[in-house]
Image (cartoon, rainbow, N blue to C red):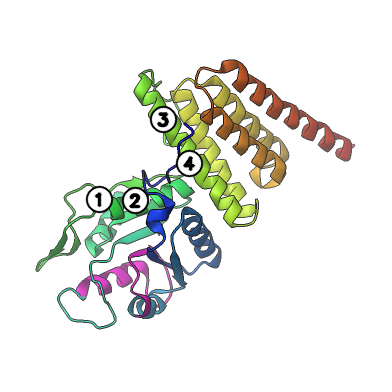
Amino acid sequence: MNRRRHLPSANLKADDLTQLRVLVVDDHVNTVRLIVDVLRAAGVGTVSAATDGLRARYILSRDEPDVLFTDWRMPFMDGLELTRSIRQAAVERDTTVPNPAIPVIMVTGHRTAAEVETAREAGVNEFVMKPFTPAALLSRLQAVLTQPRSFIVSDKYLGPDRRRKAEISYAGPLRRTSDPEEVVDVVERQVARETISVELEAMRRLIVARGGVDRATLQMTYRVMQHTRFRARQVRDRMLERATDALLVYAEEVGGMEQCEPDVVEAHLTVLGQILEGDDHDAVGAAKLVRGLEALIRRKRAARQILAA
């Protein structure tokens, strides 16, 4: 696995994204910054931002972006209204909308089937559910770039062909409380490990892009670690599971991932990457790496006890 790592967008290399122009629309400044950082870390060449739909309309006409990420609830003009106004330009000429068929990815906390259907009726291409991980965000970008859908213009609907079932990118806690079904097939195991690898790589890129570990990346790391532990159990990789558990348990002890020291988080991401990059059958080497993490946790725990005394 020493080949060049692909993005979590399933085989889109960073070089493929340098000419891409993306517009991010959200009234929460921190969310905008986080999405922008994820996209830039992935290699997207031009990323612009707007805090509401009206401002987004102006940037659409000025910059002619290739893809649009938008929040649902915003002042002045929300994401649904923005999407509808863009799609309407396919039948009513609007010089401020250069491309009525621009892919629209909605980043939202709305999860019900009715809400998803409402957004699809408005002409939304893909969904990313909050809270998200870098891989979840980039996978939806991959979907609109590599799986484009025909644009439908009819009396009842304007937007991407809806015959493909909407895929909601899930990035929160696991839906089921039961243990995952184990993966025993060699090929499936390799695919599962590669999925873990690209999500961790996306997380590392984001941390670098933001200049280090901060509150937002710590929160996101917690979700990535939950996913990693789930998949490690699927592939029956005890060392991956132990390394992930070491961080998650420590986070609980100190009052949450946000209280974890940056060097602890970075050490875990590094070791997890090393385990995945190494020989799948090198149990001795993987165990040595994990023991190093567990020793680090013990030192941190002891230091905290001394300070608390």
**Badge 4 amino acid:** Glu
Q: Which residue does the image show at 15% across and 64% down from the upper left? A: 157
x, y percent for residue 253: 71, 35
Q: Earlier in the sequence, mark 2 or mark 3?
A: 2
Extent of the magenta region = 62-88
User: Along the horizontal axis of the image, is 71 left or right of 83?
Assistant: right
Q: Which residue does the image show at 55% across and 26% down from the upper left? A: 240
Q: Are marks 4 and 1 in contact (CB under 8 Å)?
A: no
x, y percent for residue 245: 60, 29
Q: Are marks 1 and 2 in contact (CB under 8 Å)?
A: yes
Q: Earlier in the sequence, mark 4 or mark 1?
A: 1
**Badge 2 amino acid:** Gln
- Residue linked to disc 4: 199
**Badge 1 amino acid:** Gln
Helix, strand or loop under label 2 = helix
User: Image height check: is 180 above or below 80?
Assistant: above
Local packing at callout 2 (Cα closer than 10 Å; few below 14, some 14-19, many 20+) is some
> Can residue 71 be seen in the rendering of this structure?
no
> Can residue 246 be seen in the rendering of this structure?
yes
- Residue linked to disc 2: 142
**Mark 3–mark 4 distance (CA, rounded to whole Å):** 11 Å
User: Image height check: is 148 above or below 71?
Assistant: above
Q: Are marks 3 and 4 in contact (CB under 8 Å)?
A: no
- Residue linked to disc 3: 192
Local packing at callout 4 (Cα closer than 10 Å; few below 14, some 14-19, many 20+) is many
